[in-house]
């Protein structure tokens, strides 16, 4: 596909405030960003996994104890993920750079074009796109390890990583009991409930709010803060969990995770860093730049997280609320 440079005709100058209709929030990437680390290798370690025996009562007689049992070993398995490339390009013609004072649209005396620099605007827009691509990939990324220079590395995202703690809701709405069941699964898998966050979309959040209201539960807004991200909380019999809306979750899917065991893994280019802006070779009266970076997700042990799939995608209605309140009242009576 040929390059498209910003020129006077395809990127006219306007006055007025600018508003971005696209998503700019990256709560998942930001929550795990406090533990950011670097690597100089495409493949990196997410941890070693091993399993000790389930507890049981030994039956060893005094006579039998005179002979030591046969030796055996506990084996370990190393788990890995990969970084992947994120790359965008922008190009601006010399004529466009020198023509920022020519304005289209409605012009009022004294107004100035916004933005002042076409290049700055295009770079900022592409950086925002890369941020969204990373957020999507960290949640949904399907793992692929390169087998050659023409095969892309793809980092494994949180949802594909989760295999142990999965609940299929069969079309039911998200409820307080389903959330508790997922916490129970994580705890029974020897995960921890101490720092869990429930990531969900707007519909699932409304379903959970409706169920909480019907059962006299309280979701406390902004009670926690993780790396600058405000987290709501709800108290369950298995501990207090955070609640945060996430973009890019598949419809009917929510996830529960511990951001404290996860981290972005960056692979900087020596002498340039990571996600740098670089001018490319000129071929005429314009300048082309590239944005380049490599990053992957260290999701930690997958049994510390869980997911619920197959949830209803319908918003709760007032009738649903009334039905649940009556049901709870009848049970209490």
Image (tube, rainbow, N blue to C red):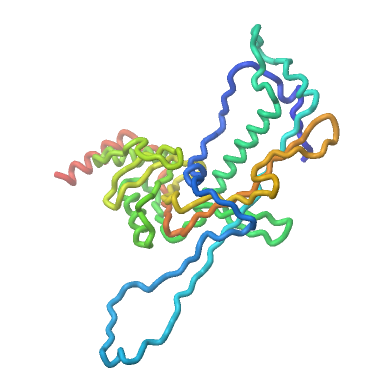
Residue at 67% of width from left, 59% of height from top?
A: 146
Residue 239 pos. (x, y %) = 30, 50
Residue 209 pos. (x, y %) = 33, 38
Residue at 48% of width from left, 52% of height from top?
A: 262
As drawn, the residue found furthest toward the right would be 284
282 shown above or below 160 = above
Q: Describe residue 283's horizontal placement relative to residue 169 as left or right.
A: right
15 shown above or below 62 = above
Q: Describe residue 37's horizontal placement relative to residue 236 as left or right.
A: right
Inspect this view and state whether residue 130 appears: yes
Q: Nearer the viewer, residue 252 or 115?
A: 115
As drawn, the residue found furthest toward the left would be 333
Q: Number of callouts in the render?
A: 0
Question: In the rendered image, which quarter contains the C terminus?
Answer: top left
Residue 31 pos. (x, y %) = 47, 44
Inspect this view and state whether residue 314 appears: no
Residue at 60% of width from left, 56% of height from top?
A: 82
Question: In the rendered image, which quarter contains the N terminus?
Answer: top right
225 shown above or below 14 = below
Residue at 43% of width from left, 45% of height from top?
A: 199
């Amino acid at each position: 596909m040929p390059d498209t440079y910003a020129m006077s005709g395809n990127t006219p100058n306007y006055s007025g405030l600018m508003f971005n209709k696209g998503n700019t929030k990256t709560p998942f990437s930001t929550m795990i960003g406090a533990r950011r680390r670097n690597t100089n290798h495409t493949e990196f370690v997410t941890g070693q996994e091993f399993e000790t025996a389930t507890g049981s009562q030994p039956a060893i007689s005094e006579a039998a104890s005179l002979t030591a049992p046969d030796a055996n070993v506990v084996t370990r398995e190393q788990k890995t993920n990969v970084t992947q490339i994120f790359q965008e390009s922008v190009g601006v013609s010399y004529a466009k750079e020198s023509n920022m004072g020519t304005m289209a649209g409605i012009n009022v005396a004294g107004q100035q074009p916004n933005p002042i620099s076409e290049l700055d605007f295009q770079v900022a827009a592409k950086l925002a796109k890369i941020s969204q691509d990373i957020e999507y990939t960290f949640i949904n990324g399907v793992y692929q390890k390169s087998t050659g220079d023409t095969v892309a590395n793809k980092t494994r995202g949180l949802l594909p990583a989760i295999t142990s703690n999965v609940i299929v809701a069969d079309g039911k709405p998200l409820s307080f009991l389903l959330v508790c069941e997922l916490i129970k699964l994580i705890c029974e898998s020897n995960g921890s409930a101490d720092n869990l966050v429930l990531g969900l979309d707007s519909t699932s959040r409304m379903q959970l709010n409706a169920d909480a209201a019907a059962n006299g539960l309280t979701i406390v807004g902004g009670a926690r803060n993780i790396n600058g991200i405000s987290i709501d909380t709800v108290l369950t019999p298995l501990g207090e969990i955070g609640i945060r809306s996430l973009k890019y979750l598949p419809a009917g899917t929510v996830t529960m995770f511990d951001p404290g065991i996860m981290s972005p893994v960056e692979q900087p280019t020596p002498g340039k860093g990571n996600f740098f802006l670089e001018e490319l070779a000129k071929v005429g009266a314009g300048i082309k730049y590239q944005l380049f970076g490599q990053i992957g997700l260290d999701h930690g042990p997958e049994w510390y997280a869980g997911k619920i799939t197959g949830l209803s995608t319908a918003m709760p209605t007032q009738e649903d609320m009334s039905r649940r309140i009556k049901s709870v009242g009848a049970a209490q009576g």
